[in-house]
Image: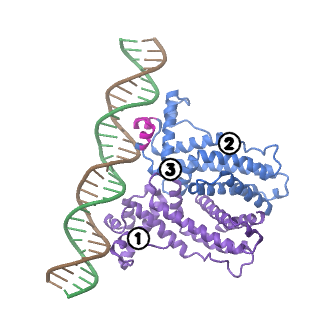
Chain colours: A blue, B purple, C brown, D green
Amino acid sequence: MTTQASDRADQAGKGVLGEQSEASRTRILRAAAQIAAECGYEGTTISKVTKRSGLPVSSVYWFFRDKDHLLAEVVRHSFDEWIAVQPTWDRPRPGARSIGEALRTILSRSTASLASAPDFLRIGHMLLLEKRAEEPAGRGIFMQARRDVEKALTAWFGVFLAGDARAERSDLPRDLARIVIAATDGLFLAHQIDQAGDPRDFVDMVVTIVEAAVEVV
Amino acid sequence: MTTQASDRADQAGKGVLGEQSEASRTRILRAAAQIAAECGYEGTTISKVTKRSGLPVSSVYWFFRDKDHLLAEVVRHSFDEWIAVQPTWDRPRPGARSIGEALRTILSRSTASLASAPDFLRIGHMLLLEKRAEEPAGRGIFMQARRDVEKALTAWFGVFLAGDARAERSDLPRDLARIVIAATDGLFLAHQIDQAGDPRDFVDMVVTIVEAAVEVV
DNA sequence: CGGTCCATAGAGCGATCACTACAGGGAGCA
DNA sequence: TGCTCCCTGTAGTGATCGCTCTATGGACCG
């Protein structure tokens, strides 16, 4: 899941855009992300994007094929920004003693960034909730990102539990990964209501749940 | 949280509509619920509603003030339908021995109906995800419904834990209620991707989590 | 039969939608 | 100076949006 070239750059055959060009493209993406967060998928109009970005409609269609591809790139761009600041899930931190401690370290950073720039998560959830006939391009991108995260989390749990007696149940790491993701989804949604909720409480909750789940199983 | 009279019935001063009238109103609500599930809030257009319901636009505006109030009534109607088939949360079932067993009984019925008619949950989640300036009427209705459920769940846990040593921590029942709600949200969302997932697995998961949480705290 | 009210039918309003066409400006190179 | 290419500016397309208007069919009451 890495950033691919835009529609325009694809046609030009180069992955590199000029400074001005890149800046304009990013301004459009940011404006679209904000508006999608406020008005939803269908509520995001090209007119609003041009007003907020300050760029004309022709610039939007210069960089992006149509509205659908614009929003797909918003999801991709936002997810790439998020994943770039994540700690590596490849293996447990060397100093970690318990699974709870290790998980807490990672989740603290993940949720902190989730609270600051969750556009891909917000828009992705919107796209998951709609079951329309012709699915938007952004939906596929979000689902792929989700699968990647689940895979990484599963691997992380797998490595951590290696040598453990419970490792015999081969689907335990995957179940734990799904619990973490589902808990993140549910509490991200709860956060939309109760903005005052402390992210650390959220982390405590998830860690408690996972520790307990490992204990019980 | 009970069904209120519609805009039209309000003006007429009577809560009762004729047979034909009630049937038409319900057809419009059902059509709007389906379309909102497919296309989202802004994607729900009066034109689509008239096509699917078979009733003309004038009938829609006869029963509902505008699009916003129509969708608010969809949320209310769907939630009322759901709550009507729920078991009472007032007190634990007499025969239940453990909190896990009691919770399992209730959650089994709740999730079974969630899988069949979750329109209010789906639309409600959409409304929660959007943080627009002027909030839709349906959002307030959904949040009130949510608070009612949290309250009932909190009371249920409170009664169940009465006399327990842990009852000293007065916010434990509320925390448990929020865990159940967040887990339901998260796994409802996961269900949108993996339609094949067995609801019973879902119940097992939540029960395990709550049992563990009670144990650990 | 005429009067009243409910619900439906359908035309049409101005505004906005996604998107296109095309001209023009500015930086680089000659 | 003139040519080229990238990006911007503006005007406009037909379609559809939410919503209003007026007319009408049918049930009930006299």
Tell whether position B43 is magenta.
no
Q: Which residue is mark 3?
A: A136
Q: Are marks 2 and 1 in contact (CB under 8 Å)?
A: no
The residue nearer to you, when weighing D24 against C19, is D24
Q: Quadrant of residue D26?
A: bottom left
Q: Is residue B178 left or right of residue C9?
A: right
- The answer for which chain carries disc 1 is B
Q: Are marks 1 and 3 in contact (CB under 8 Å)?
A: no
Q: Amino acid at mark 1?
A: Arg
Instruction: Decide if residue A155 is in sight here.
Output: no
Q: Is residue D14 above or below residue A15?
A: below
Instruction: Report the mark closest to the observer, 2 or 3.
Output: 2
The residue nearer to you, when weighing B130 against B34, is B130
Instruction: Report the mark closest to the observer, 1 or 3.
Output: 1
Tell whether position A59 is magenta.
yes
Residue at (58% x, 59% y) in the render: B192
Q: Is residue D16 left or right of residue A184?
A: left
Q: CA distance from mark 2 to mark 3?
A: 27 Å
Mark 2 or 3 closer to N-term? 2
Q: Which stretch appears magenta?
A: A48-62
